[in-house]
Amino acid sequence: MRRRIVIPAAAAVCVAVVGVLAVIGNAWWDSRIPATYSVMSYGAHDFGGGSEPTAHDAHGPGGLSVTDLHGAQVAAPDARFALVARSATIRLASGRSVEALTFNGMSPGPELRVRQGDDVEVVLENDDVDKGVTIHWHGVDVPNAEDGVAGVTQNAVLPGQRYTYRFRVDQVGTFWYHTHQVSSKEVRRGLFGVFVVEPPEKPPGVDLAVAVHTFDGVPTLNGDDSSGRQTIAAATPVRLRLVNTDSFGQTLTLSGTPFRVLAIDGTDLNAPTELENIALPLAAGGRLDVGYVQPPGSVRLAIEGSDVSIGLSPHRAPARGEQVPAGEFDALAYGTPAPTPFGAMSSYDRRFELKVTRKPGFFDGRPGRQWAINGGIYPDVPTFIVEEGDLVEMTVTNDTNVVHPMHLHGHHVLVLSRDGVPSTGSPWWSDTLNVSPGEKYVVAFRADNPGIWMDHCHNLPHAAEGLTMHVAYAGVSTPFLIGAEHHNEPE
Ligand code: C2O
Ligand code: CU
């Protein structure tokens, strides 16, 4: 009697255990990312409540390949640059040396400055970076084939190979460039630089771009890990272009002068007001331009709470310490409203939800707490399908306990609201938006740049862990593959 009960019970437990193992085994098996695949083939297509385009299978009538979307090849470009990627030992001001990956032997790579309207040509050559290199023009809304994403818009440029980028710049502002092949490692090791588009009439004064980057755990400003100095005559107007090239937020302080935030992510703000003693948080990948008029005393730009700084002063003005900031810059109500091409009241062709959470599961066969987008772990993430001309609204929610700087390639989004509070200051256009834990942003953009565009977290290790997806235009396909013989691995 006893045995009869015990045996079926044990058997039932066994069956249950086997069943659970089978489910887990399946989840593990399914999560493995194939060695070679197309970004078009994964996840589910999300049409944002808009029409389902007939050509969305990409090979349909009127279909375009990413390779049809190159910038124009002009005989005599206005600006021409050559960037050679190679490994090199660089020396920080403190004397510390870093085994870096460089453009033209330096990191940051050369600062590229062009004029609005210029036709730009950049020849990238890879000397010895064995995993390959590309260049992504972060924040520049280039044609899709110039976007530099390995496995999506081109193949990684392997040692000994070259690739030429061509695009015309219509924007004005502060941008940066970086490799988009194994970017979580290669950008950290130094494959980046600043890209500035100046207005046709350059305003008088000092214009200084400052890239923040951490090498081997050592924070630097333009590659300098100490307290640098720059001489600026009193009464000179100064524009500082602050670029965060790290994969985490950085906060800068500007002590000794009132200032204005002139631009966010390369777009000028309308009638910004004067601030003083306010810290400047920079999203990973984000930019802020600040302006001030040089006082007779010295001004100090610093990574908050550190000695890494630049003193900006007329001759002989004594250096100054950091003022403790009384608050942090927030763009939501800063500056003065101005007309925008669309807004909260517009009628949208598509509305997407992009919800970031964390949940237990498998990512590429590894168990753990994974990033999820709309409940799916990469590659089971949505692709947002749009059609050219669409007005698109996107609600981005962060239900995790860390910040995610969300970066959409090829477009700038207009911030409509945060946590239900409308944006009431200057129009706030962004390409790299810090979404803090618990926050919800509603943003909007015009789908006016056909292609397949990444939308990912610019904490690049997060992207490498699967916090990445695409906005794809109906009918556009890519012949490039993740993996494959160039070992394309964008993140
Ligand atoms: Cu600055 Cu997809 O990156
Ligand atoms: Cu993130």
Image: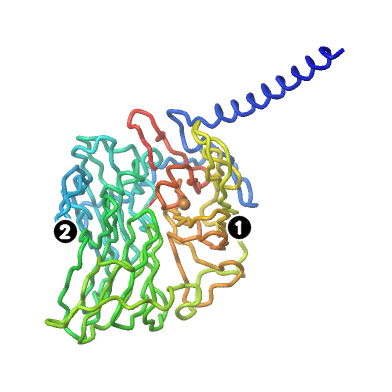
Is 181 situated left or right of 14 in this image? left
Q: In which quarter of the image is the N terminus?
A: top right
Residue, disc 2: 94
Is 380 situated left or right of 233 in this image? right
The picture places residue 252, in percent across and down from the top left corner, at 34, 69
Say the numbered circle drawn on residue 349.
1
The picture places residue 318, in percent across and down from the top left corner, at 17, 81
Residue at 57%, 72% in the rendered image: 422
User: Badge 1: how crowded within 10 Å, few (<14), some, or many (20+)?
Assistant: some
* Outermost right residue: 1
Residue at 57%, 62% in the rendered image: 440
* Outermost front residue: 2
User: Badge 2: how crowded within 10 Å, few (<14), some, or many (20+)?
Assistant: few
Q: Dividing the picture into quarters, in which one does residue 319 lie?
A: bottom left
The picture places residue 119, in percent across and down from the top left corner, at 26, 57
Q: Dividing the picture into quarters, in which one does residue 194 lie?
A: bottom left
Image label count = 2
Q: What residue type is labelled 2?
A: Ser
Q: What residue type is labelled 1?
A: Asp
Which secondary structure lies at badge 1?
loop
Residue at 42%, 54% in the rendered image: 410
* Outermost left residue: 316
Is 228 situated left or right of 334 in this image? left
Say the numbered circle drawn on residue 440.
none
Q: Quadrant of the C terminus?
A: top left
**Color theme of the render:** rainbow
Which secondary structure lies at badge 2?
loop
Q: Dividing the picture into quarters, in which one does residue 361 lie?
A: top right
The picture places residue 198, in percent across and down from the top left corner, at 27, 68
